[in-house]
Amino acid sequence: MATPEPRPLRLDAPALDAYLRTLEADQAPFTIPGHKRRAAPLDVGLARVVDSDVPLHAGLDTMRLSGDTLGRAERLAAQLWGADWCRFSTGGSTHANQALCLAVGRLGDRVLVSRTLHRSTFLGLVLAGLRPVWLPTAVDPDTGMPTGVRGADVSAGLREHPDVVAVMVTEPGYLGTIGELEQAAVAAHAAGVPLLVDAAWGAHLGFGAGFAKHALQCGADAMVTSAHKTLPAYSQGALLLARDGLLPTRWLDAAFDATHTTSPAGAVLASIDGARALLAQRGPQLVGSLVALAARLRTQLRAALPGLRVPGPEDFAPGRFDEAKLVLLLAGCGVDGVAVEAELVEAGVPVEMADRDVLVPMLTLADDETTVRRLLAALLPALQRHAGPARPAAVSVSWRRAAEPTLSPREAWFAPTEVVPVHAAAGRVAAELVAVYPPGVPVLAPGERIDSTVLAALLSARDSGVRVAYAADPQLGTLRVIAEPGTPRG
């Protein structure tokens, strides 16, 4: 018997359907965007980019939003993820994380935060004037991978700092590990505060029996997730989902609107809605196929090169690893990941992340045997060409930062600053955020004292070919630091 054709997603996705109906309609809009979906007379190349751009206002909906198109789509997403409230962001998880920061407390309040937070959350602390109490970063000594938040650390942090107003963690981590979210939720709720989770990398979690759960299933009060990472949505598409209670959704609405564009791109919104409908229709099947694909790849890669480590869910406690994540640990086979990445880019197969010891090819719902064959055809010879003597695995500087805060992020942001040579920066207080990218976890952050060991690790990462991001001087010849008393603001 033939497999029936899947039901067209637009029939179950109000924003996607409105987007397609707009493109199919015979219209001559006298509204923005300025291209009017007819840029071809101006430039054919430009038209290929903008002629499928539809706004929310006078596009997916009327100018007054009388059709509630987006609201209906967001309510369907809340239902799918088991939330009471949902908003679609066209500013990515960055915007959603910052909205959470603005919603959770008042100026000067303290929050318990993972030190593996993304840059966006740190800057959310600046915007909201919140003071972080850092949770320690647990690292697996065997692999050098961060293993996520520990429930005991959350309990201890809340006991030591009873004035904390929220717990904010990043799960799953960039390398696929997942912390003890259920225990963290129990600890937070016992203290009467919400657990907020940046789950940007986990939009596919929770779909299918036996797979890792998503944050709301683990008891979180709010979850940010990116629809454009593992799901087939436009870049910048993200969702903010929450349960009403410890974090009133009226505050979330206000914070979300305060930091979101008033002209959201309809294509991004429609793609989030379409990705949501895809999960609702075929989520367990698609995620199951993705997980099976990742498992086969791990087996093939482990057999291809002695010393190559490719961790999987069997290496962690149940539910503590994203089964779809593919992470190659290279120290045991002597491979330089930056050199391999250069060959992959030349072959037209770029990967998500590479440093000397780690390579991360990103698998998504759009991958299949065809794309994986092309990956292997380029990856396996490159790994074999660069294989050499085993070396000790080093913990990335992104995961080993022991922060020594001296000023709150907001105080440091507005403090007088000066620029000093990098060799003179150790012991000073950072005035800028510096990260290795990917993953974008702050290594130096405004308000924290600069440790000489961490500084040396940053310079080593730079010299190995890894991108150093967000610093005013990306070559790290200089750093911006908090000025000595009496120095005018730089």
Image: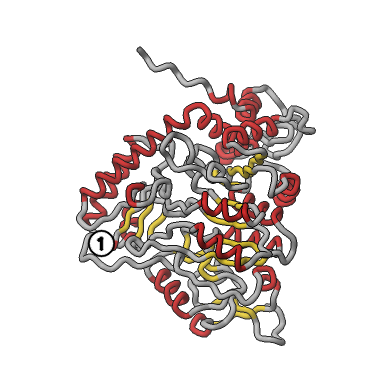
In the depicted structure, whether residue 281 falls above or below residue 292: above
The quadrant in which residue 409 appears is bottom right
Quadrant in which the N terminus appears = top left
Q: Residues within 10 Å of mark 1 (few under 14, many from 20)?
A: some
Residue at 57% in and 33% down: 80
Residue 146 position, x and y percent, is: 43, 60
Q: Does residue 347 appear in the picture of this structure? A: no
Q: How many marks?
A: 1
Figure colour scheme: secondary structure
Asked where in the image residue 324 lies, by quadrant, the reply is: top left
List the single residue furthest toward the right.
64
Say left or right for 404 vs 38.
left
- In the image, 149 versus 450, the foreground residue is 149
Instruction: Decide if residue 98 is in sight here.
Output: yes
* Residue ID at (64%, 27%): 14
Badge 1 marks a residue whose secondary structure is helix
| Residue 61, picture quadrant | top right
Spot occupied by residue 96 in the image (x, y as percentages of width and height) = 63, 49
Foreground: 153 or 417?
153
- Disc 1 marks a residue whose amino acid type is Gly
Image quarter in which the C terminus is found: bottom right
Please state the horizontal and vertical placement of residue 247, each as a whole percent of the image: 69, 49
Pick the residue in front: 7 or 480.
7
* Outermost top residue: 1
Image-based side of 311 in relation to 114, left or right = left
Residue 171 drawn at (x, y percent): 50, 52
Image position of 486 with respect to 319: above or below: below
Q: Is residue 392 left or right of residue 475?
A: left
The residue wearing badge 1 is 332
x 70%, y 45%: residue: 245
Looking at the picture, tell me which residue is in the foreground, 291 or 301. 291
